[in-house]
Amino acid sequence: MKITKYGHACLLVEEGGATILLDPGVWNPVPEATGIDAVFITHEHQDHIDIPQVTAVLGRNPDAVIYTHEAVGRLLEEAGLLYTPIAEGETVSIQGVPVQSFGHDHAIIYGSASPCRNTGFLINERLYVPGDALHDVPLKPVEILALPTGAPWMKLAEAIEYAKKVRPKVVFPIHDAMYTEEYQRGLVPRIVGRNLEGIEFRDMQAGAVEEF
């Protein structure tokens, strides 16, 4: 599996015959990749979906299909963009590569209610991208975890505990664009990376391309 981290939560995943883009939002550069088969969007917040970016991606990849839930779908429809709804627990095939959805609610920011719906995606039973939630654990083994390491709804201890619950072989950080370089490259590897108890921490920064 080849993963490009554009920045924050935006990832390009190349696996088998499939090329998949996840969460093109406002805190990453506009993805310029071609050959994209599908775009998966976890939830409606702007750091995960930016309509101008999605429009630009589809302009370069007119055959790409957007998969998301109905709440995000309403935003897409308002912009005149088509999408295919994916239900909780549903699996779709992208060029022979299965992608299964997990979860329903975004993490609570304050109070007792989730601010919106959130869907995590498990790609080829290898890579899990949770979106903005650390409470949904796929009921399948996960090899690679894209781990949120900074947000107004979490603390680093919660990220560490979540990684230990999922028990992947390797994690890499996402959801970190709002923090300084010192936080991203210093504090996160030191606090998260050193406390994963046998799970490899791979410190991918914005623009990195890694093979897994």
Image: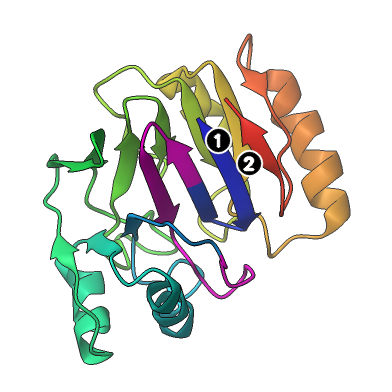
Residue 10: x and y in percent read: 53, 57
SS at badge 1:
strand
Q: Residues within 10 Å of mark 2 (few under 14, many from 20)?
A: many
Residue 5: x and y in percent read: 62, 50
SS at badge 2:
strand
Q: In this view, does 86 lie to the left or right of 211?
A: left
Check residue 70 for magenta coloring.
no
Q: Is residue 114 left or right of residue 77?
A: right
Indicate which disc, 2 or 1, sits on the residue closer to the N terminus. 1
Which amino acid type is marked by label 1?
Lys
Check residue 24 for magenta coloring.
yes
Classify residue 6 by image quadrant.
bottom right
Q: What stretch is highlighted in magenta?
A: 13-32
Residue situated in front as seen by the camera: 79 or 44? 79
Q: Residue 2 carries which label?
A: 1
Residue at the spot of label 2: 173
* Main secondary structure of the magenta stretch: loop
Residue situated in front as seen by the camera: 209 or 60? 60
